[in-house]
Structure formats: structure tokens, C-alpha cells
Amino acid sequence: MKVRNVIENTLNILPNVADMALRNPKVALELLPSAFEGFVLEEGREHDHMEIQNKCPTTYTWTYEDMNEQSDYGKIYSVAKRRQWNAEDLSWDTDVDPLNLEKAVIPEQLLPVYGTELYPKENRARGQIMHSAAAWLLSQLLHGEQGALHVSCQTVEVNPQMQGKLYGATQVMDEARHVEVFYRYLNEKLDKLYTVDDNLF
């Protein structure tokens, strides 16, 4: 990355960092490394994937003594198995017009510029803004769901109880479906997918 961009990006975020540091120095200090990587170096946009080194321990159990269906984990595992759902069962043939303000994907009032002089009066321009805003928001949710997928995988690794691992596996599958549904909705219905936001990165 060019040094000039790093300097410009640093100057752009300084007021926000200073404001946060005054309000909560501990949080600002903890967020500083990721803020630098995201906002200054813009690493979230530099590559199409990211690797994180993980020191998550993997716990094996060889006795399977806790494979009791009446245990707390056994009960919720049983319920989770029965209540699994399939993304294919959703109504994917439902027509979605992302430019239609009367059936907006997200409420128009959620837009930061809504009701200000900067917000356009013309319906077509407002529809385009709403389309982009919905796609951006749902894209960030998609990226967040991928994070949830990774974390739920770790709960299977670290849980010392076998029934806990089995229940954790149902959560992994649930997060996988969330990723599938958000990705499919963004591609098939909104036809727009944004990369990870610097702040989320």
C-alpha cells in the first residue's frame, strides 16, 4: 500500500480514535490493532480471504460416558435434530424488487441521511440508495455469519462432553444455513454483494 494512502487514512480516523479514547481508553486500546489493519491498511479489501491463527484446543473423549439422551445437552441435541430446516424450503420464487420503496427490504428510516437535505426526493434515486443500503447491510450480516460459523466449529472442538459436541454440531449446521441463505438472497434477489466493511474487518 502506498505510504500516502496510509497517512491519509490515519488522518481520517484520528478524530474518531481520539473521541473513543476520551470516552473509553481501555476499549480504544483493545481496538487499536484491528482499527489500524481495517481503516488504515485496509487489509479487509486487500485479499479475497483472510487466515487467522487459532490456538483453540481440540478435546477428544474416548469413553463416551456422557452419551445420555436425558442429560441437558442430550435433550437440546434431540430437539435441535428434530427442528432442523433446509434453505431449499424457503420461498425463493418470491419476487423481490429492491428498488420498490413500498416493499423495502429494510425500513427507509434506518438510513443515516433519511429526512435530511442530502436525502433525494425522487423515488428512483431513493430506491437506488435503499437497494445499495440493504445489500451493504445484508453483506455485512453474511460476513458476520461466516464468523459465527467458525466460532461454532470451535465449540465442537473445545467441549469436553460428547453430547455437547453433538449439540454444537447442530449449531455449526445452523450457521452454515445462515451463510447459505444470506449469500443466496444477496446474489439471486439483490444482485449485489459488498466486501467486508473496514470496521467489521
Image (cartoon, rainbow, N blue to C red):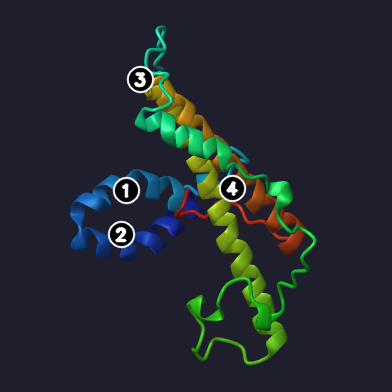
Measured in 3D between alpha carbons, the distance from the residue under mark 1 to the one under mark 4, in whole angstroms, is 30 Å
Measured in 3D between alpha carbons, the distance from the residue under mark 2 to the one under mark 4, in whole angstroms, is 33 Å
First in sequence, mark 1 or 4: give its number. 1
Binning the other alpha carbons within 10 Å of mark 1 as few (below 14), some (14 to 19) or many (20 upward) gives: few
Q: Position of residue 114 (x, y in %)?
A: 51, 84
**Residue at (51, 49) in percent of width and height:** 144
Front residue of this view, candidates 132 and 138: 138
First in sequence, mark 3 or 1: give its number. 1
Badge 4 element: helix
Which quadrant would residue 175 be assigned to in this image? top right
- Picture disc at residue 160: 3
Which quadrant would residue 176 be assigned to in this image? top right
Q: Is residue 118 left or right of residue 92?
A: left
Q: Is residue 81 above or below residue 30?
A: above
Q: Is residue 168 left or right of residue 24?
A: right
Q: Are marks 1 and 2 in contact (CB under 8 Å)?
A: yes
Measured in 3D between alpha carbons, the distance from the residue under mark 3 to the one under mark 2, in whole angstroms, is 41 Å
Q: Is residue 167 above or below residue 157?
A: below
First in sequence, mark 2 or 4: give its number. 2
First in sequence, mark 1 or 2: give its number. 2
- Picture disc at residue 17: 2
Circle 3: residue type: Pro
Q: Is residue 194 left or right of residue 165?
A: right
First in sequence, mark 3 or 2: give its number. 2
Front residue of this view, candidates 195 and 163: 163
